[in-house]
Image (tube, rainbow, N blue to C red):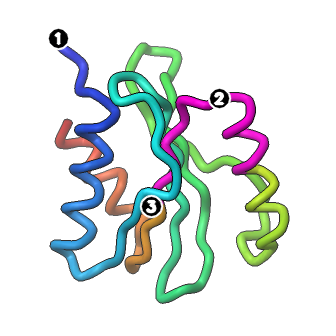
Amino acid sequence: MARLTSRFLVDLILRRTQAAGGFAAVLAKGDEHSGTILIQCSDRGRPGPLLERRFSADGHYIWEAVGQTDPDDDEARANYQDRRRSADPDLWIVELDIADAPRLVAEWAALT
């Protein structure tokens, strides 16, 4: 089975967020084909979890909460993103501001 490119998935997430009435933006572009995707979730400006697309043990992609445990700690959130970006320059960082972003990301991922 062919795998979808990172760029395609980022574009899908952007379009679906905007179609659902939310805000979405790419904060950092990664590798078009195989870059890891990190999503910064918020709901009406209130920070939510950071989600990263990773391989599971069974070889499928999953979305996993990563980074600090306190979403209100802006400095820890920024530091985590900076560390990930410096360790992986192919990393995409996408911001979503929409109600229940983690649930929506999981639903959209199930479509791919």
| Horizontal arrangement in the rendering, residue 52 relative to residue 4 (left or right) | right
Residue 75: which numbered mark, if any? none
Residue 1: which numbered mark, if any? 1
Sequence-first disc among 1 and 3: 1
Q: At which x and y percent is residue 108?
A: 25, 51
Inter-mark Cα distance, 1 to 3:
26 Å
Give the class, few, some or many, for how many residues have Cα within 10 Å of label 2's Cα (few <14, many ≥20).
Answer: some
Q: At which x and y percent is residue 14?
A: 28, 60
Image depth: mark 2 or mark 1 in front: 2
Give the class, few, some or many, for how many residues have Cα within 10 Å of label 1's Cα (few <14, many ≥20).
Answer: few
Question: In the image, what residue type sits under mark 2?
Answer: Asp
Q: Residue at x 23, y 26 (%)?
A: 4
Question: In the image, what residue type sits under mark 3?
Answer: Pro
Q: What is the magenta range?
A: 81-94
Q: What residue is shown with label 3?
A: 102
Inter-mark Cα distance, 2 to 1:
26 Å
Q: Residue at x 75, y 77 (%)?
A: 72
